[in-house]
Amino acid sequence: MNLTCALCGHGCDSVPHLSFQCKYSHKFWSSIKGMFYMDQTGDDMHQNNNIKSVMSKIGTAACVYNVWHERNMRLFQDKYIDEITLIKMVKEEIKWKLLSLNVKKSDAVIQT
Ligand SMILES: [Zn+2]
């Protein structure tokens, strides 16, 4: 069994590699995290109903799922999506999830 990362072709296929070392994952996360407040920290990010916190959670879940899905598609079905195309697909997916939310109109929501 090949233990090389299916996404970048370097490093060991492992959760730490995918999370912290993989060039494919890094490029993917770098392109998305700022748009959906996934790089934010602080008190307002710990409030469950805060719109930025909700956006961060939806964005993080979509990114983790899609990176893992792309890895599995490459390993088990020999199908590939380049990171630019995957980034566009995930941004659309997150956008549609956010548009389906039923949120109260508040200053924070309007500003976000
Ligand atoms: Zn990798």
Image: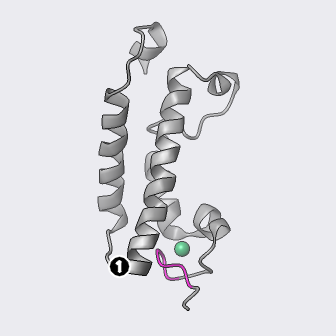
Please state the extent of the stretch shown in magenta in the rendering.
Answer: 4-9
Residue that sits furthest to the front in the current view: 76
- The amino acid marked with disc number 1 is Gln
Quarter placement of the N terminus: bottom right
Judge whether 76 appears above or below 92 on screen: below
- The quadrant where ligand 1 appears is bottom right
Residue pointed to by mark 1: 77
Q: Residue at x 46, y 71 (%)?
A: 71
Q: In the image, residue 65 lies at what x, y percent?
A: 47, 55
Q: From the viewer's perspective, is 11 left or right of 111? A: right
Q: In the image, residue 38 lies at what x, y percent?
A: 55, 40
Q: Image quarter for residue 96?
A: top left
Please indicate, yes or no, whether residue 6 appears anywhere in the rendered image: yes
Q: In the image, residue 70 lies at what x, y percent?
A: 41, 67
Judge whether 35 appears above or below 86 on screen: above
Q: Residue at x 32, y 28 (%)?
A: 99
| Residue 59 lies in the magenta-colored region | no
Please indicate, yes or no, whether residue 33 appears anywhere in the rendered image: no
Q: In the image, residue 40 lies at what x, y percent?
A: 60, 34
